[in-house]
Amino acid sequence: MARKPDDTVHLKLRLPERLRAFIEKQADKRGVSMNTEIIDRLGHSYAAIKDLNAEITKAKILEIADELRGSKATPMESLEKELERLREESNAKFLALQASFQSTLRLIDEKLAGAPAPMPPRSEQAEPAKGRKS
């Protein structure tokens, strides 16, 4: 059965402990769950990218229209050329965002480097030896 867009999906996620601790700290500051913090941050990131892409697309369409008015190339040739240029520009912007994300992770890592190590989950804590009397 296919999922519906408004279904809530359980997702198992692996991330570095320092990033998890950072997310937890930010969630505590806002008084929300880690789940809400992650969803909000992802939503804001994708919304910002979508808004940026919409603005770029609008500007490019206006630019293409201006070029078509004074160009000897066919509209299809102009559009294909512009599409290729936009692909290259989009790829460059993606790489820049990726580098920025990596840089942010490094900053978080550096900031949390001095933080005390988190307590291991209860199941991983050493249990006293059974059958021995102290």
Image (cartoon, rainbow, N blue to C red):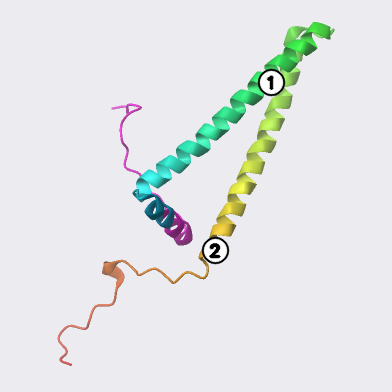
Q: Mark 1 points at which residue?
A: 59
- Above or below for 7 versus 98: above
Which quarter of the figure has residue 132?
A: bottom left
- Where in the figure is residue 115, as x and y percent of width and height? 47, 69
Magenta span dominant secondary structure: loop
Q: Depth check: 71 or 33 in front?
A: 33
Residue at image location 32% in from the left, 38% down from the top: 9
The reply to whether residue 36 is in sight is yes
- Mark 2, residues whose alpha carbon is within 10 Å: few (<14), some, or many (≥20)? few
Q: Where is the N terminus found, in terms of image quarters?
A: top left
Residue at image location 68% in from the left, 16% down from the top: 61
Q: In this view, does 48 lie to the left or right of 30?
A: right
- Above or below for 133 versus 127: below
Is residue 40 part of the magenta span, yes or no? Answer: no
The reply to whether residue 12 is in sight is no
The part of the chain drawn in magenta is: 1-23
- Mark 1, residues whose alpha carbon is within 10 Å: few (<14), some, or many (≥20)? few
Q: Name the residue under label 2.
A: 111
Q: Is mark 2 on a helix, strand or loop?
A: helix
- Most extreme residue toward the bottom, as rendered? 134
Q: What residue type is labelled 2?
A: Lys
* Earlier residue among tags 2 and 1: 1
Q: What residue type is labelled 1?
A: Ala
